[in-house]
Amino acid sequence: METKLAYQAVEEVEADALAVVLFENEADPAELKFASSWLEGLRACGEFSGKSDELVVLHQPQGIKAKRFVAVGGGKKENSDLRRATAAAVRALKQKGVKKLAWWLNGGDPEAAAEGAMIGNFEPDQYKTANQGKSLEEFCAIAAGNGREFDLAFERGRVLAQAQNFARSLVNEPANRLTPLILADRAGAMAAEAGLEFEMLDQDRMRQLGMGSLLGVAQGSAEPPALIIVRYKPEAAPKTGDHLGLVGKGVTFDTGGVSIKPADGMEKMKYDMAGGAAVLGAMQAIAKLKPAIPVTAFVPAVENMVGGRAQRPGDIVKSLNGKTVEVLNTDAEGRLILIDAITYAQRQGCTHLVDAATLTGAIVVALGHVNAGAFTNNEALLAKVMAAARAEGEKIWHMPLDDEYKDLLKSAFADLANIGGRWGGAISAAWFLREFVGDTPWVHLDIAGTAWLDDAKPYMAKGPTGIGVRTFARLALNW
């Protein structure tokens, strides 16, 4: 889809449809005089009130060149989400045959409009051979006057949405088409195109280094593991010694191992690498947006399979930092691969760490499918992450990490166990990671409930959401 920003009068816009967000608690703009009586009638009869996800179409409007005029509900203006409104309109209108959509910003944020349009246009149907969903061909945001700030904001939104859709496309790949090594190939191709440094540690190198925790998870699969590393270095020397490390869980398929998952829903376990996809998507955006600090992404990529060589409950592994772990449940594998990646990130000079992982079902019990859970050992870093998430419209909720929860991980036979029992499962999983972080400022995002949609929403297709991409890129930009 082509996206562009144009400066012209509403009446002069030529498109299949001209759309604008209208609100519950605000009068319609004077510029819409060509549709004022129509809108008044709709509001009077209750057919359109401006509530979120409402959409009405006026065909062949008089006084403008667009073939249709579309009013999109934005809810109450103070709570309005322009990304969601734009995405919902794109998804609805492309099904009505609209190919060229003009979007009158009316003072709205061009970045959010660009993001919403591209996110809404994404469909996870690349493997369908027929009856593919319709797609928008052109999205043109319309603004008054001419301003460099608008141009920059629109381009930033386009870059972020493109990166988010890149992450979604990775998550959407079935496990037979995205093994750990293929994920490494895709990351390498992205890095080469974006001008980033790429490195991959193979199984032999990880064994030499002593990544026993990561390799223990991988040993049951015929597909070899990989530790994917993508580096961004700013053109100018950074003003501080800060180095941001992004760590993403990359389990390309998760059977649960010997502690096998139920068959129902296991097909979705291709999305267990959504954290890894998010940090790779963020790196694609970071390469183009060029923040002032160095950023390095680490994606431990494995398959967690059942087989004659698979890790067993009761096995004890030695991690890269030297601590030993008793594996009580092989389905708690994400934390086992993350700890070796975190230690390696520290050894590579990262001074601040943020990880993203589809880590626990417990976070879904706690927060449902609305918020990701955030855990930290450093309130200042968490504040930066939360500010970035708010700016990008991604919902994150701060979860506790009190010292008392650490006791859940006690083991009689190793330094700690990899699970902490039934209660507080998301918290004990985060505490497990914290045991390997030390004093490095760190934030852990458990995105298990927010990385995948079981059903399509008005504003997003069923499947991968790409959560985390925009937050991580904004975090680096705002540093």
Image (cartoon, helix red, strand yellow):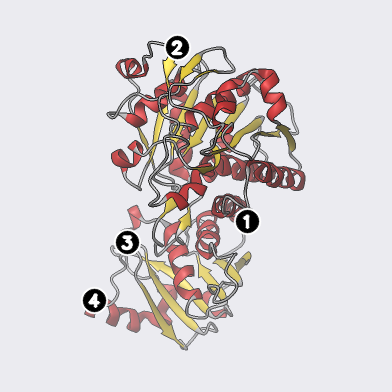
Rendered location of residue 364, percent (x, y): 34, 42
Q: Earlier in the sequence, mark 1 or mark 3?
A: 3
Q: Which of the labelled discs sits on residue 141, or is there none?
A: none
Question: Along the line of sight, which residue is nearer the eye, 95 or 385?
Answer: 95
Residue position for label 1 = 151
Q: Which quadrant does the C terminus fall into? A: top right
Q: Quadrant of residue 414?
A: top left
Residue position for label 4 = 46
Q: Earlier in the sequence, mark 2 or mark 3?
A: 3
Per the image, label 1 sits on a secondary structure element best described as helix
Q: Earlier in the sequence, mark 4 or mark 1?
A: 4
Residue position for label 2 = 415
Identified by mark 1, the residue type is Asp
Viewed as shown, does residue 251 lie left or right of 240? left
Distance (Cα) linking label 1 and label 3: 27 Å
Question: Along the line of sight, which residue is nearer the eye, 271 or 467?
Answer: 271
* Mark toward the viewer: 2 or 1: 2
Question: Along the line of sight, which residue is nearer the eye, 421 or 387?
Answer: 421
* Mark toward the viewer: 2 or 3: 2
Residue position for label 3 = 75
Identified by mark 2, the residue type is Asp
* Mark toward the viewer: 4 or 1: 4
Viewed as shown, does residue 326 lie left or right of 184? left
